[in-house]
Amino acid sequence: MLAAESRLTAVAPAPSEPLAGWKHILEAADPFLRQVATRLEAQTREFDPEMAAYAQYALGVQGKQLRSLLVSLSAESVGQLNESHLTAAVIIEMVHLATLVHDDVIDEADLRRGRPTSAANWGNEIAVLLGDCLFAQALKLAASFPTPEVCRAVAAATNTVCAGEILQSQSRGNFEVTREHYFKVITMKTAELFALSCNLGAYLGQADPAQREFLQKYGKSLGTAYQLYDDCLDLLGSELIAGKTLGADLAEGKMTLPVLVARDRASAPDLELLRQWLRNWNPAFLPGLLKVLHKYDALSESRTVIQIYLTAAREAAVALPVSEGQTALLGLTHFLAEQTEALGVVY
């Protein structure tokens, strides 16, 4: 899935790091995030009255609003927040929520954050069209800016996200999918909206071209690390933290990094075992799969890859002016690094 906000639990940063912790970052951004939520809810009045209830339901599944948070922090890292940042955050959240509506149709998901999906409530036909309406409304808002730059960026990012979904759908159940393909899908499906959030936060904050480039790189690197973490959490976390049945990605035919690592290192007998498990996934296979992942050190390599992307995000943030926004951006990378190190402690 594209989103994993509700799956993070706060871990205090190391005392040696003078960085804002997750709780502090959220508290500082709370006024902005509340305004985004209020304005997003108000968008339901822009729809035909007979479908407003559908839109209200779809727009009511907001998680931690990470993309809105990145708009805010990016703006504060180069200047100050302004009214346009609220609109940009609403646009990006709407695009994100539209992708979730479509994801749930594709995945045949019954629940999203503990409640029935739009597709489960009203069927696939309405859910698909509802997602389309959310995309269209987001682009309508983007077109309200006096410059076409915002609309162009939102449209391009939306195109990339949808193309990433197509590529992932094409590779479902493909045991031979390459790592290159896997990372391409992650970059397109998840990292693209993180990058857009940082890009628009910078652009609307009057950042210079170099700062805007650094922030876009930060968003893409953080978004990639975040999706990798979420993919690992699906196998190596706990159901309480993950907020879903573990192994859900495999049940949907999605190969993720820990499995790819084990597949590429496995002996012939273990390779055949993996192939059989993944061909007809059953949650009862998870303990055996975890043993194979542990045998081939898949968690360690996955952690290393995540840390590489977090380092890239940190390097981009360090190039920005010293500010509370920059400190928070750095804090996010350290927080996710600690969450990553906490994965797999059960074995």
Image (tube, rainbow, N blue to C red):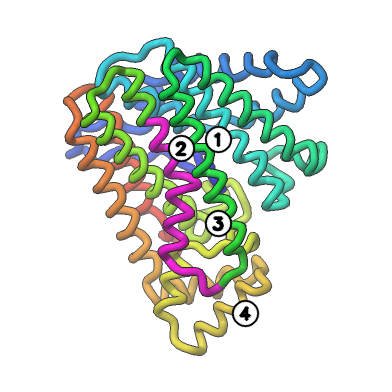
Do tag 1 and tag 2 residues touch (Cβ < 8 Å)? yes
Instruction: Tell me the chief SS of the magenta region.
Output: helix
Type of amino acid at the residue the image marks with label 1: His
Secondary structure of the residue carrying tag 2 is helix
Pick whichever of labels 1 and 4 is earlier in the sequence.
1
Give the quarter of the image for residue 220: top left
Secondary structure of the residue carrying tag 1 is helix
Do tag 3 and tag 4 residues touch (Cβ < 8 Å)? no
Q: Is residue 158 above or below residue 44?
A: below
Q: Which residues are magenta?
A: 175-198
Q: Position of residue 117 (x, y in %)?
A: 72, 40
User: In front here: 181 or 31?
Assistant: 181
Q: Is residue 177 magenta?
A: yes
Type of amino acid at the residue the image marks with label 4: Gln
Look at mark 1 in the image and give the residue it sits on: 96
Give the residue displayed 45% in from the left and 69% down from the top. Answer: 178
Secondary structure of the residue carrying tag 3 is helix
* Camera-nearest label, 3 or 4: 3
Q: Residues within 10 Å of mark 3 (few under 14, many from 20)?
A: some
Q: Position of residue 334 (x, y in %)?
A: 29, 42
Look at mark 2 in the image and give the residue it sits on: 193
Do tag 1 and tag 4 residues touch (Cβ < 8 Å)? no
Look at mark 4 in the image and give the residue it sits on: 276
Type of amino acid at the residue the image marks with label 2: Leu
Do tag 3 and tag 2 residues touch (Cβ < 8 Å)? no
Q: Residues within 10 Å of mark 4 (few under 14, many from 20)?
A: few
Pick whichever of labels 2 and 4 is earlier in the sequence.
2
Give the residue displayed 48% in from the left and 25% down from the top. Answer: 151
* Camera-nearest label, 1 or 4: 1
Distance, label 1 to label 3, CA atoms, is 18 Å
